[in-house]
Amino acid sequence: MENERSKVEVAVVGAGIIGLAIAWRLAAEGREVLLIDAETCPLPASAGNAGTIAAYNNAPVGSPGVLRSLPHLLTHADSPFTMRWAGLPALTPWLLRFLRECLPARARANAAALASLLHDSLEAWHELADATGTADLLRRNGALYVFPSEAAFAGAAWPREQRAAAGIRQQIVGPREITALEPALQAPTGPGIFFPEATHIVEPAELLRRLRLAVTSAGVRLVTGRVDRLERGAPSILLAGPGLAVEADRVVIAAGAWSRTLARQAGDAVPLDTERGYHVEYALATPPFSRPVCPIQFGVYVTPMAGRLRAAGTVELGGLARPPDPRRPALLDRAARSLLPDLPPPTSHWMGFRPSLPDSLPVIGRARGEPRVVHAFGHGHLGLTLAAVTARHVADLLSDREPAAVLRAFSPQRF
Ligand SMILES: Cc1cc2nc3c(=O)[nH]c(=O)nc-3n(C[C@H](O)[C@H](O)[C@H](O)COP(=O)(O)OP(=O)(O)OC[C@H]3O[C@@H](n4cnc5c(N)ncnc54)[C@H](O)[C@@H]3O)c2cc1C
């Protein structure tokens, strides 16, 4: 931890992909910005993810189909949606809210809200990447879902309907077209969906490293430190932690899955928890795919990255403190092998923390009774995708510009 005592115009807490995108945007608008990061994990979710800028993915996790299959999902070791049962008492309030969000009308409203935020996400990313010299890390090559059978495809109509309702482009493809798109793929046994506009990041950790350089070059000061306390004083807000005492005119809370306590100190009780996710990687000088491919029954993307292939995904409800489940990497390995049976053994594995709300919607908005604090966390499965567009909205909120109408669904006061 550094010894940091300073006064600043805007302090952003958290230098994951969300905090970095916000810091860059604010610096570009001429703000004096201090970015504080606790270095909570060696590889945060922003670096360990599947790398998809998935502007097509407006289906919330909670849906009528998930509700129907929840008993099966939660009790099978191989399921893409599991729970660490020892954590049940702490998880119960989140789970009960999640169950409510699975009801048809709520789930449809959540899908529509996500679509409205996703609408400009790709365009915002291109702006951010061009301005920060990171465009070479983006590949606009589409993404592919593959289904094990016609029956599995038919059973997954709900997310397709939500995408269609939002006008999202999706092409239904048969086994022959799937093979034409990805010739290395094991002979497909069912149909697929191709998302032609999808873009992926070939090296998420490198993206973070380069964004850090870009924001510091733009004048942002980046310090290592953990903010434990947010005190709403006059004329400033105090952010304090070991070796840290920062007075800020404005504060952005972008501390990912660790944001709940700070949000409460800013006046908002937000049911933030974590959906833990895993990845395994295979060293392959030339990855056999040219785009992310998702074998849908596993809930995993297999994404080509620089010098390797990464299989990333699944959901595990288990909080921030429990160690990883050693059985999960084997499941991801099976998912990757369902597409590419001859893969070499994995070379590494990882677990990370998605910051997740029960309705799968992020929290973007001013704190209750404290307009000097803006929340920007809880992006769940879509934090990489939504980083640049979130930064635009946060910059508007901090400039006291009228919040965009789409932000109503993401209010911290919706709970
Ligand atoms: C397996 C997996 C696959 C995924 N795939 C995708 C994908 O393909 N596409 C997509 O869009 N999203 C994906 N996601 C989700 C995405 O990675 C997350 O939503 C996103 O990274 C969240 O970013 P963040 O900046 O909010 O949080 P984080 O990346 O967790 O960063 C939070 C930062 O805050 C810091 N911090 C925490 N507490 C404090 C404190 N008190 N004081 C100071 N600093 C603090 C931490 O050190 C950390 O650096 C995936 C996630 C997982 C786990």
Image: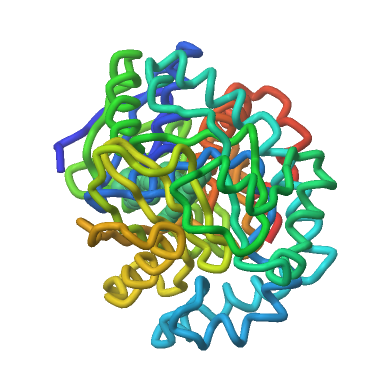
Camera-nearest residue between 132 and 14? 132
- Left or right: 241 as drawn, with respect to 287: left
Residue 184 higher or lower than 391, as above or below: below
> How many numbered dots are placed on residues in this image?
0
Q: In which quarter of the image is the N terminus?
A: top left
Residue 97 higher or lower than 402, as above or below: below
Image coordinates of residue 249 in percent, x first then y, are: 45, 28
Residue drawn at (67%, 66%) of the image: 62
- Left or right: 217 as drawn, with respect to 191: left
Residue drawn at (71%, 64%) of the image: 153
Residue drawn at (33%, 33%) of the image: 208
Image coordinates of residue 110 in percent, x first then y, are: 74, 55
Residue 285's quadrant in the figure?
Answer: top left
Residue 311's quadrant in the figure?
Answer: bottom left
Residue 360 higher or lower than 63, as above or below: above
Camera-nearest residue between 176 and 261? 176
- Left or right: 29 as drawn, with respect to 160: left
Camera-nearest residue between 104 and 403? 104
Residue 342's quadrant in the figure?
Answer: bottom left
Camera-nearest residue between 398 and 191? 191
Image coordinates of residue 292 in percent, x first then y, are: 49, 45
Q: Is residue 166 visible?
A: yes
Q: Quadrant of the C terminus?
A: bottom right
- Give the colour scheme shown: rainbow
Residue drawn at (57%, 36%) of the image: 142
Q: Is residue 383 visible?
A: no
Image coordinates of residue 31 in percent, x first then y, are: 45, 16
Residue 90 higher or lower than 342, as above or below: below
